[in-house]
Image (cartoon, rainbow, N blue to C red):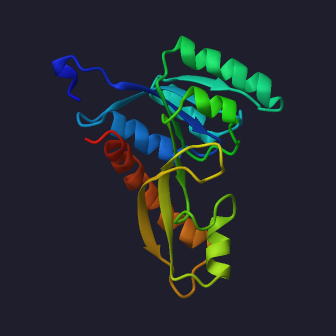
Amino acid sequence: MDLSTGCSKIRTAVFISGTGSNLKSLIKFSKTIKSPISIEFIVSNNSKAKGLNYSKIYKIKKKILNFENKNLSEKKLLSVLKANNIEMICLAGFMKILSKNFIKKFKGKILNIHPSLLPKYKGLNTHQRAINNKEKYSGCTVHFVNARLDSGKIILQKKVKISKNETKASLAKKILVQEHKLYPKAILKAFNL
């Protein structure tokens, strides 16, 4: 997808709730020639999310919705995304579960990164659960989002060895490094590039 040939990139929104480290790596990736996406929008359910700073740094539009009323928030969100011609969504540490109806509107165009080797350890607290179960490996997974939590079709996974004295924090750090590499690769794979 070379811009010089006139092919336009896929207009993408990234949904975050925290530091936005995956968002940052996706923004960097989006600026490379081989990237099929351009990040046009950042959405967060947390007005204090550090990752929102990237909207200033990279001049990307942002929207903050508290999701207290999920129906209302999703309605607003859909109209904002539509107004900005958003074609794809990347969830990057977004701590809210999207409704079936919302997912249907973006069928096959929502990706998520999850810090475990799915189908193991869906949901939260994945690192501690992997350590408690004496797993030899954990890792991360990029998958398509469907109506069931962390159950969509897997695009790519990366294994990470759990060392003997691993803590939740040290494992999280190791996996995050791999997440930053995996997400862009998974996007390329999802679009057969």
Q: Tell me where residue 102 sits by quadrant.
A: top right
Vertical placement of 41 versus 117: above or below? above
Q: Tell me where residue 147 sits by quadrant.
A: top right
Instruction: Identify the residue shown where x is 57% and y is 19%.
Output: 81
Q: Is residue 170 left or right of residue 123?
A: left
Pick out the residue farthest to the bottom.
Answer: 164
Instruction: Identify the residue shown where x is 63% and y is 20%.
Output: 78
- Quarter of the image where the N terminus is located: top left
Give the image location of residue 142, x and y in percent: 47, 52
Pick out the residue farthest to the left.
Answer: 5
Residue nearer the viewer, 146 or 193: 146
Q: Is residue 183 left or right of residue 63?
A: left
Give the image location of residue 61, x and y in percent: 53, 21
Q: Tell me where residue 129 sits by quadrant.
A: bottom right
Q: Is residue 20 left or right of residue 2?
A: right
Instruction: Identify the residue shown where x is 48% and y is 16%.
Output: 85
- What is the count of numbered marks? 0
Q: Is residue 33 left or right of residue 43?
A: left
Pick out the residue farthest to the right.
Answer: 69
Give the image location of residue 20, x and y in percent: 55, 43
- Quarter of the image where the C terminus is located: top left
Pick out the residue farthest to the top.
Answer: 83
Vertical placement of 107 versus 118: above or below? above
Instruction: Identify the residue shown where x is 56% and y is 33%.
Output: 53
